[in-house]
Amino acid sequence: MRITREPELYDPPSTATRRLGRQVLIQWKAVGRAAMFTGMGFLYFRYMFSHRNRHEVFYQMFITGIRSLGVLTVVALFTGMIFALQTGLELARYGQEVHVGGAVTVVMLREMGPFMAGMILTASVGSSVGAQLGTMTVSEEVAALEIMSIDPIRFLVMPRLVAFTIMVPLCTFYTDIIAVLGGGLVGYTQFGIPPYLYYDNALIYAETKDLWIGILKAFVFGVIICSTACYQGFSTTGGAVGVGKSTRNTVVISFLLTLIVGYIITRLFYA
Protein backbone atom coordinates (compact mmCIF):
# COMPACT_ATOMS: atom_id res chain seq x y z
CA MET A 1 0.00 0.00 0.00
CA ARG A 2 1.51 3.32 -1.07
CA ILE A 3 1.40 6.10 1.49
CA THR A 4 2.25 8.93 -0.88
CA ARG A 5 -0.11 9.60 -3.75
CA GLU A 6 -1.01 12.28 -6.22
CA PRO A 7 -3.60 14.83 -5.05
CA GLU A 8 -7.14 14.05 -6.11
CA LEU A 9 -8.89 16.82 -8.04
CA TYR A 10 -12.66 17.10 -8.25
CA ASP A 11 -14.98 19.32 -10.24
CA PRO A 12 -16.58 21.98 -8.02
CA PRO A 13 -19.99 20.80 -6.73
CA SER A 14 -22.92 22.56 -8.30
CA THR A 15 -25.32 22.35 -5.33
CA ALA A 16 -25.17 22.36 -1.55
CA THR A 17 -26.44 18.77 -1.47
CA ARG A 18 -23.63 17.58 -3.71
CA ARG A 19 -21.11 19.51 -1.63
CA LEU A 20 -22.36 17.82 1.53
CA GLY A 21 -22.38 14.40 -0.12
CA ARG A 22 -18.83 14.88 -1.35
CA GLN A 23 -17.63 15.81 2.15
CA VAL A 24 -19.32 12.72 3.60
CA LEU A 25 -17.66 10.48 1.02
CA ILE A 26 -14.27 12.10 1.59
CA GLN A 27 -14.57 11.57 5.35
CA TRP A 28 -15.59 7.93 4.95
CA LYS A 29 -12.69 7.43 2.58
CA ALA A 30 -10.39 8.83 5.25
CA VAL A 31 -11.85 6.42 7.83
CA GLY A 32 -11.30 3.51 5.47
CA ARG A 33 -7.72 4.52 4.74
CA ALA A 34 -6.97 4.86 8.46
CA ALA A 35 -8.48 1.40 9.03
CA MET A 36 -6.24 0.00 6.30
CA PHE A 37 -3.17 1.55 7.96
CA THR A 38 -4.17 -0.03 11.26
CA GLY A 39 -4.96 -3.44 9.78
CA MET A 40 -1.66 -3.60 7.93
CA GLY A 41 0.12 -2.48 11.09
CA PHE A 42 -1.38 -5.43 12.96
CA LEU A 43 -0.32 -7.78 10.16
CA TYR A 44 3.26 -6.63 10.62
CA PHE A 45 3.19 -7.48 14.34
CA ARG A 46 4.90 -10.74 13.43
CA TYR A 47 8.05 -8.71 12.70
CA MET A 48 8.05 -6.76 15.96
CA PHE A 49 10.99 -8.73 17.41
CA SER A 50 12.95 -9.00 14.18
CA HIS A 51 16.48 -7.61 14.11
CA ARG A 52 15.31 -4.80 11.87
CA ASN A 53 12.40 -3.65 14.05
CA ARG A 54 12.90 -4.61 17.68
CA HIS A 55 15.04 -1.59 18.59
CA GLU A 56 12.43 0.84 17.26
CA VAL A 57 9.62 -1.10 18.98
CA PHE A 58 11.31 -0.91 22.39
CA TYR A 59 12.16 2.76 21.84
CA GLN A 60 8.54 3.60 21.06
CA MET A 61 7.39 1.66 24.13
CA PHE A 62 9.82 3.69 26.22
CA ILE A 63 8.59 6.96 24.72
CA THR A 64 4.93 6.03 25.11
CA GLY A 65 5.01 4.51 28.58
CA ILE A 66 8.06 5.27 30.70
CA ARG A 67 8.37 8.93 29.73
CA SER A 68 4.69 9.46 30.53
CA LEU A 69 4.86 8.10 34.07
CA GLY A 70 5.58 11.47 35.66
CA VAL A 71 2.50 13.26 34.38
CA LEU A 72 0.43 10.08 34.78
CA THR A 73 1.39 9.90 38.45
CA VAL A 74 0.43 13.51 39.20
CA VAL A 75 -2.85 13.37 37.26
CA ALA A 76 -3.87 9.98 38.67
CA LEU A 77 -3.04 10.95 42.25
CA PHE A 78 -5.05 14.15 42.19
CA THR A 79 -7.89 12.56 40.22
CA GLY A 80 -8.29 9.96 42.96
CA MET A 81 -7.97 12.58 45.69
CA ILE A 82 -10.51 14.95 44.12
CA PHE A 83 -13.01 12.20 43.45
CA ALA A 84 -12.63 10.81 46.98
CA LEU A 85 -13.08 14.27 48.48
CA GLN A 86 -16.19 15.15 46.47
CA THR A 87 -17.77 11.73 46.94
CA GLY A 88 -16.90 11.62 50.62
CA LEU A 89 -18.44 15.02 51.30
CA GLU A 90 -21.74 13.87 49.85
CA LEU A 91 -21.66 10.45 51.54
CA ALA A 92 -20.80 12.08 54.88
CA ARG A 93 -24.19 13.81 54.83
CA TYR A 94 -25.75 10.35 55.23
CA GLY A 95 -23.07 8.88 57.47
CA GLN A 96 -21.83 6.58 54.68
CA GLU A 97 -18.36 8.01 54.02
CA VAL A 98 -16.89 4.56 54.64
CA HIS A 99 -17.98 3.65 51.10
CA VAL A 100 -15.61 6.16 49.51
CA GLY A 101 -13.13 3.37 48.74
CA GLY A 102 -15.65 1.40 46.74
CA ALA A 103 -16.80 4.44 44.77
CA VAL A 104 -13.29 5.54 43.84
CA THR A 105 -12.15 2.06 42.86
CA VAL A 106 -15.17 1.21 40.72
CA VAL A 107 -15.15 4.51 38.87
CA MET A 108 -11.41 4.37 38.20
CA LEU A 109 -11.45 0.76 37.00
CA ARG A 110 -14.52 1.12 34.79
CA GLU A 111 -14.13 4.56 33.30
CA MET A 112 -11.74 7.17 34.62
CA GLY A 113 -8.57 5.05 34.57
CA PRO A 114 -8.57 4.24 30.84
CA PHE A 115 -10.06 7.64 30.01
CA MET A 116 -7.40 9.63 31.87
CA ALA A 117 -4.57 7.47 30.53
CA GLY A 118 -5.92 7.84 26.99
CA MET A 119 -6.25 11.61 27.30
CA ILE A 120 -2.76 12.07 28.68
CA LEU A 121 -1.12 9.83 26.08
CA THR A 122 -3.08 11.53 23.31
CA ALA A 123 -1.84 14.95 24.37
CA SER A 124 1.74 13.97 25.11
CA VAL A 125 2.50 11.14 22.66
CA GLY A 126 -0.24 11.05 20.02
CA SER A 127 0.30 14.70 19.11
CA SER A 128 4.03 14.06 18.86
CA VAL A 129 3.47 11.12 16.50
CA GLY A 130 1.19 13.19 14.28
CA ALA A 131 3.71 16.04 14.13
CA GLN A 132 6.67 13.72 13.51
CA LEU A 133 5.03 11.77 10.71
CA GLY A 134 3.58 14.97 9.26
CA THR A 135 7.04 16.52 9.11
CA MET A 136 8.40 13.40 7.43
CA THR A 137 5.58 13.49 4.90
CA VAL A 138 5.92 17.13 3.86
CA SER A 139 9.71 16.82 3.69
CA GLU A 140 9.24 13.77 1.42
CA GLU A 141 11.06 11.39 3.77
CA VAL A 142 8.12 8.96 3.53
CA ALA A 143 8.32 9.10 -0.27
CA ALA A 144 12.05 8.39 -0.02
CA LEU A 145 11.35 5.28 2.06
CA GLU A 146 8.98 4.01 -0.62
CA ILE A 147 11.55 4.69 -3.34
CA MET A 148 14.05 2.58 -1.36
CA SER A 149 11.41 -0.21 -1.14
CA ILE A 150 11.04 0.25 2.63
CA ASP A 151 7.43 -0.16 3.69
CA PRO A 152 6.42 2.90 5.79
CA ILE A 153 3.71 0.86 7.51
CA ARG A 154 6.23 -1.64 8.85
CA PHE A 155 8.95 0.93 9.50
CA LEU A 156 6.85 3.74 11.01
CA VAL A 157 3.35 2.56 11.93
CA MET A 158 3.91 -0.92 13.34
CA PRO A 159 6.38 0.04 16.15
CA ARG A 160 4.08 2.83 17.31
CA LEU A 161 1.01 0.61 17.14
CA VAL A 162 2.77 -2.04 19.23
CA ALA A 163 3.78 0.60 21.76
CA PHE A 164 0.28 2.05 22.10
CA THR A 165 -1.53 -1.30 22.32
CA ILE A 166 0.82 -2.51 25.06
CA MET A 167 1.60 0.62 27.02
CA VAL A 168 -1.85 2.25 27.19
CA PRO A 169 -3.32 -0.75 29.11
CA LEU A 170 -0.25 -0.84 31.38
CA CYS A 171 -0.48 2.91 31.99
CA THR A 172 -4.17 2.49 32.73
CA PHE A 173 -3.46 -0.14 35.38
CA TYR A 174 -0.82 2.15 36.89
CA THR A 175 -3.27 5.06 36.86
CA ASP A 176 -5.87 2.95 38.68
CA ILE A 177 -3.42 2.02 41.43
CA ILE A 178 -2.18 5.58 42.01
CA ALA A 179 -5.73 6.98 41.99
CA VAL A 180 -6.95 4.44 44.55
CA LEU A 181 -3.94 5.25 46.75
CA GLY A 182 -4.73 8.96 46.43
CA GLY A 183 -8.34 8.29 47.40
CA GLY A 184 -7.17 6.32 50.41
CA LEU A 185 -4.97 9.22 51.49
CA VAL A 186 -7.93 11.63 51.39
CA GLY A 187 -10.18 9.08 53.09
CA TYR A 188 -7.75 8.78 56.00
CA THR A 189 -6.79 12.44 56.40
CA GLN A 190 -10.18 14.05 55.62
CA PHE A 191 -12.75 11.51 56.83
CA GLY A 192 -10.78 9.40 59.30
CA ILE A 193 -11.32 6.15 57.39
CA PRO A 194 -8.68 3.57 58.40
CA PRO A 195 -6.66 2.32 55.42
CA TYR A 196 -7.64 -1.32 55.97
CA LEU A 197 -11.34 -0.38 55.99
CA TYR A 198 -10.95 1.76 52.87
CA TYR A 199 -9.31 -1.05 50.88
CA ASP A 200 -11.65 -3.73 52.23
CA ASN A 201 -14.57 -1.65 51.04
CA ALA A 202 -12.88 -1.16 47.66
CA LEU A 203 -12.47 -4.93 47.21
CA ILE A 204 -16.10 -5.56 48.17
CA TYR A 205 -17.54 -3.33 45.45
CA ALA A 206 -14.95 -3.71 42.70
CA GLU A 207 -15.10 -6.83 40.54
CA THR A 208 -12.55 -8.50 38.31
CA LYS A 209 -14.85 -7.69 35.39
CA ASP A 210 -14.38 -3.97 36.05
CA LEU A 211 -10.62 -4.33 35.73
CA TRP A 212 -10.78 -6.31 32.49
CA ILE A 213 -13.31 -3.97 30.89
CA GLY A 214 -11.04 -1.05 31.74
CA ILE A 215 -8.06 -2.84 30.18
CA LEU A 216 -10.15 -3.58 27.07
CA LYS A 217 -11.07 0.10 26.81
CA ALA A 218 -7.42 1.06 27.15
CA PHE A 219 -6.44 -1.33 24.35
CA VAL A 220 -9.10 0.11 22.04
CA PHE A 221 -8.09 3.66 22.98
CA GLY A 222 -4.48 2.85 22.14
CA VAL A 223 -5.47 1.61 18.68
CA ILE A 224 -7.63 4.69 18.10
CA ILE A 225 -4.95 7.17 19.17
CA CYS A 226 -2.20 5.53 17.13
CA SER A 227 -4.27 5.05 13.97
CA THR A 228 -5.53 8.64 14.15
CA ALA A 229 -2.05 10.07 14.68
CA CYS A 230 -0.51 7.99 11.88
CA TYR A 231 -3.26 8.79 9.40
CA GLN A 232 -3.14 12.51 10.16
CA GLY A 233 0.64 12.49 9.85
CA PHE A 234 0.66 10.67 6.50
CA SER A 235 -2.11 12.95 5.18
CA THR A 236 -0.23 16.17 5.97
CA THR A 237 0.13 18.74 3.21
CA GLY A 238 1.10 22.38 3.13
CA GLY A 239 4.40 22.51 4.99
CA ALA A 240 4.66 23.77 8.57
CA VAL A 241 1.07 24.98 8.62
CA GLY A 242 -0.10 21.53 7.59
CA VAL A 243 1.96 19.90 10.34
CA GLY A 244 0.29 22.12 12.94
CA LYS A 245 -3.13 21.29 11.53
CA SER A 246 -2.38 17.54 11.61
CA THR A 247 -1.23 17.78 15.22
CA ARG A 248 -4.40 19.60 16.22
CA ASN A 249 -6.60 17.14 14.32
CA THR A 250 -4.85 14.22 16.00
CA VAL A 251 -5.67 15.52 19.47
CA VAL A 252 -9.23 16.64 18.72
CA ILE A 253 -10.27 13.51 16.81
CA SER A 254 -8.65 11.18 19.35
CA PHE A 255 -10.42 12.94 22.23
CA LEU A 256 -13.80 12.68 20.52
CA LEU A 257 -13.40 9.05 19.48
CA THR A 258 -12.18 8.09 22.95
CA LEU A 259 -15.28 9.59 24.55
CA ILE A 260 -17.68 8.03 22.05
CA VAL A 261 -16.11 4.56 21.98
CA GLY A 262 -15.73 4.56 25.77
CA TYR A 263 -19.45 5.13 26.16
CA ILE A 264 -20.27 2.41 23.62
CA ILE A 265 -18.10 -0.17 25.40
CA THR A 266 -19.64 0.72 28.77
CA ARG A 267 -23.12 0.45 27.26
CA LEU A 268 -22.37 -2.98 25.80
CA PHE A 269 -20.95 -4.54 28.97
CA TYR A 270 -23.00 -2.82 31.68
CA ALA A 271 -26.41 -2.45 30.07
Image (tube, rainbow, N blue to C red):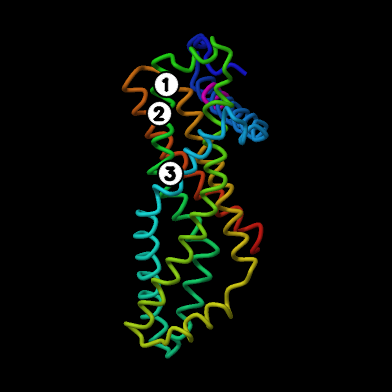
x then y, percent, for residue 237: 41, 18
Q: Residue drawn at (39%, 86%), measured in percent from left and top?
A: 92
Q: Position of residue 119 (x, y in %)?
A: 43, 49
**Labels 2 and 3: the sequence-earlier one:** 3
User: What's the residue type where badge 3 is placed?
Assistant: Thr
Do callouts 1 and 3 mark residues in contact (Cβ within 8 Å)? Answer: no
Q: Main secondary structure of the magenta part?
A: helix
- On residue 122, the disc is 3
Residue appearing at x 42%, y 89% in the figure: 94
Name the residue type under label 2: Gln
First in residue order: circle 1 vs circle 3: 3
Q: Looking at the image, do the residues carrying marks 2 and 1 touch, with CB atoms under 8 Å apart? A: yes
Question: Residue tagged by mark 1?
Answer: 136
Image: magenta residue range: 21-25
Of the two numbered discs 1 and 3 in the rendering, the one whose residue sits closer to the viewer: 1
Q: Quadrant of the N terminus?
A: top right
The disc placed on residue 17 is none
Residue at 36%, 80% (x, y): give it. Answer: 89
* Mark 2 → mark 1, Cα distance in angstroms: 6 Å
**Residue 24 inside the magenta-drawn segment:** yes
Q: Amino acid at mark 1?
A: Met
**Residue position for label 2:** 132
Q: Is residue 204 left or right of residue 63?
A: right
Q: Residues within 10 Å of mark 2 (few under 14, many from 20)?
A: some
10 Å crowding of disc 3: few (<14), some (14-19), many (20+): many
Q: Circle 2 — which element?
A: helix
Q: Quadrant of residue 271?
A: bottom right
**Structural distance between the alpha carbons of marks 2 and 3:** 14 Å
Q: Nearer the viewer, residue 59 or 254?
A: 59
Asked if marks 2 and 3 touch (Cβ < 8 Å), the reply is no
Quadrant of residue 84 in the image?
Answer: bottom left
Verify whether residue 185 appears in magenta: no
